[in-house]
Image: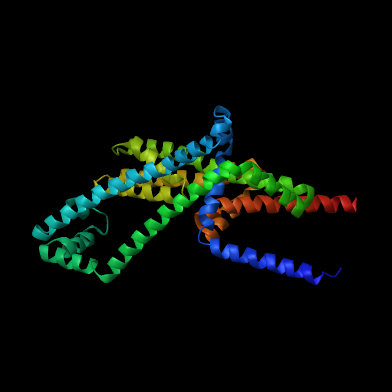
Amino acid sequence: MTIQPEVRARLLGGFLLLALGAWILHTFLGFLFWAVVLALTTWPVYRRLTGFIASRDHHAWPAVILTLMIGAMILLPLGYGLTKAIAEAQSLAKMLVDAQNAGLPAPEWLQTVPVAGAWLAELWNSSLGSPDAVKETLHLLQTGTAMAHTKDLASQILHRVFGLFITLLALFFLYRNGETLGRQVLWGSLKLFGDSGVRYAEHAVAAVRATVNGLVLLGLVEGLLLGVGYAVSGLSHPAMLGAITGVFAMIPFAAKLVLAVCSLVLAASGQAAAGIGLFVFGIVVILVAENYVRPMLIGGSIKLPFLWTLLGIFGGLENFGLLGLFLGPTVMAVVISIWRDSLEDAAISEG
């Protein structure tokens, strides 16, 4: 069947307009995707909230309230961490001023580090042990490269803050127009995949929710187990450290960073055995949770085989960063669903 010239022109014009729109929005696509993930995950909460606020005159209030709550859940921990970082930076600045006047000799515990203790102490003293060494080290740090990194960091912070604003703004409109958008997505799935399109859309939504639930629930469990490890190993404030670890555990590989810092603090204070024991215990917990339990939680909710769930998570992270953690299992769930349907259709046609 030949396509009429006017139809070709309309298709070409539509494709060019879509490409232009994608190019205009490509900087914000990641933020918009985060808004979609948050909306899909919290949609049941939004529906319950609308049940409490059912007045037609206040139909926007549920979206406003839930958006502000999610924004607060993101901003409050970040603000607390930034406040602590500023306080630590001020303490560091005071220490550097004192070091320029009297030097900063190597701490005694550094000598006790196995194998490399003497070398580390000598390196410390050559860099910070005397006022002249401190001034020379600071001079090396205060180069144009360091200033460039500082400016780049400030630019990245401003970009992320603006991105958070875009995400929350998009999230508000997704709540407001979610039902209409949902019907449009289902209609498009029906047109594209036929009667199976609704099921594919449901699998995609279930994959996103399962991934978020797997991150949050598993992060809390990791924080609880490692909090017990912190308490047994003798660290101060184990409950707070466990809570921080639980939050970081929701970000792939971030929990290992907290664990490594806590283990190094123990080793630096002369408790090398406790530090090594805590590190080994924590690594076992994190590896089992992230490489086995999390894929089973996500794959079990959407009936996705363990291997494909694991490959979807790692492949998504490799190619799309943190967004790939949600995009990978979602795409794999739809692909496997299409594959199963094609096998069923082939079996029916052969039968």
* Nearer to me, 263 or 26: 26
Image location (x, y in percent) of residue 349? 88, 53
* Vertical placement of residue 345 versus 130, above or below: above
Colour scheme in the image?
rainbow
At 54% across and 59% down in the image, what residue appears?
Answer: 320
The quadrant where residue 300 appears: top right
* Nearer to me, 192 or 63: 63
Quadrant of image for the N terminus: bottom right
* Vertical placement of residue 134 versus 339, above or below: below
Q: Residue furthest left?
A: 102
Image location (x, y in percent) of residue 112? 22, 52
The number of numbered badges drawn on the structure is 0
Q: Residue furthest top?
A: 52
Report whether residue 103 is seen.
Answer: yes
Side of 309 where 286 appears, left or right: left
Side of 139 where 313 appears, left or right: right
At 9% across and 59% down in the image, what residue appears?
Answer: 101
Image location (x, y in percent) of residue 309? 61, 50
Image location (x, y in percent) of residue 172? 52, 44
The quadrant where residue 274 appears: top left
Q: Residue furthest front?
A: 57
At 56% across and 35% down in the image, what residue appears?
Answer: 59
Report whether residue 292 is seen.
Answer: no
At 45% across and 45% down in the image, what residue appears?
Answer: 249
Side of 107 where 311 appears, left or right: right
Side of 1 where 117 appears, left or right: left
